Image: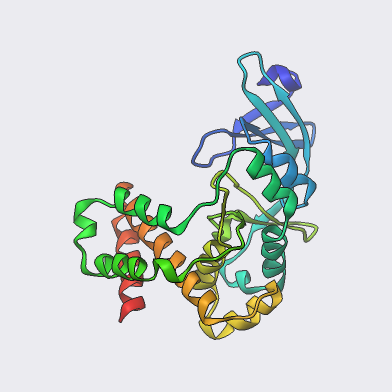
Amino acid sequence: MEHLLGTEWKITPAGGATGKAYVARHDGQQLFLKRNSSPFLAVLSAEGIVPKLIWTKRLENGDVISAQHWLNGRELHPKEMGQSRVAKLMSKIHSSQPLLSMLERLGKKNFQPAMMLKELKDRMDEELRAHPDVMLAFQFMSDHLSDIQHEEYVVCHSDVNHNNWLLSDDDQLFLIDWDGAMIGDPAIDLGMLLHEYVEEDQWESWLLEYGLTMTPHLKLRMQWYMLAQVLLSTQWNKEANRFHEMNKRLAELHRFFF
């Protein structure tokens, strides 16, 4: 990629699971480069949800390289996830018609809960599926599949972990790493965020900042999707030999039911 910027630029990997991200540095300037990012990135930038996109260029091999402003900042601390500005940015994302239209143009379909349940069952290995709390989770999800139907589908990030929230040095908040974006029930994001970071007695006030009133139906949907994400995380941690984290997730399931 050096020929895109000139040999005076130093390009180094930026880390991350995909290995497609790089940092380019020259004479005090920094750019965040990504290989084969989705056209979705341009809309995210225009909506102010990710740092500003500067340019995209196509290489001779067909790869597309995008460059964004590098912002000095930090990820949010877990205790900061209950803040009003997190709720307001999440609401902005979920209510954005440009984001939804772009994902639809890219061929994304509504991610139905039945699809999620089937994918989970197909992925979960036999040993974990035999665990009593995993069995309870699958039973709960199956029993309530018809109860969680929701008509309003929105763009969901699907991994609203605190380390995907970037707070810049000039106090701008962004949500980054959109590789897992989907069209689904907003409870996919809300369930994970509230369960992981906000005390339950504060859920109602957080949701009011977001723009929703807590209802039994919303709470059930959030619980359903939270269980789905805990199960997925349990399996992922087992596959990665992160058994301590796997057991923490199993303990979360146990606390939910007991």
Residue drawn at (36%, 76%) of the image? 256
- Total count of labels: 0
Quarter of the image where the N terminus is located: top right
Q: What scheme was used to colour the molecule?
A: rainbow
Identify the image quadrant of residue 87: bottom right
Identify the image quadrant of residue 12: top right
Picture coordinates of residue 102, whole percent (x, y): 69, 43
The answer to whether any part of residue 7 appears in the image is no
User: Which residue is nearer to you in this view: 98 or 198?
Assistant: 98
Picture coordinates of residue 133, whole percent (x, y): 26, 69
Residue drawn at (42%, 52%) of the image? 115
Residue drawn at (29%, 52%) of the image? 124
The answer to whether any part of residue 25 appears in the image is yes
Quarter of the image where the C terminus is located: bottom left
Picture layout, residue 256 above or below residue 55: below
Residue drawn at (63%, 70%) of the image? 80
Side of 225 where 231 appears, left or right: left
User: Which residue is nearer to you in this view: 218 or 79?
Assistant: 218
Side of 128 where 173 appears, left or right: right
Picture layout, residue 250 above or below residue 59: below
Picture layout, residue 31 above or below residue 173: above
Q: Residue furthest bottom?
A: 201
User: Which residue is nearer to you in this view: 46 or 140?
Assistant: 140
Picture coordinates of residue 252, whole percent (x, y): 36, 71
Q: Residue furthest top?
A: 60
Picture coordinates of residue 186, whole percent (x, y): 58, 63
Picture layout, residue 208 above or below residue 36: below
User: Which residue is nearer to you in this view: 182 or 143?
Assistant: 143
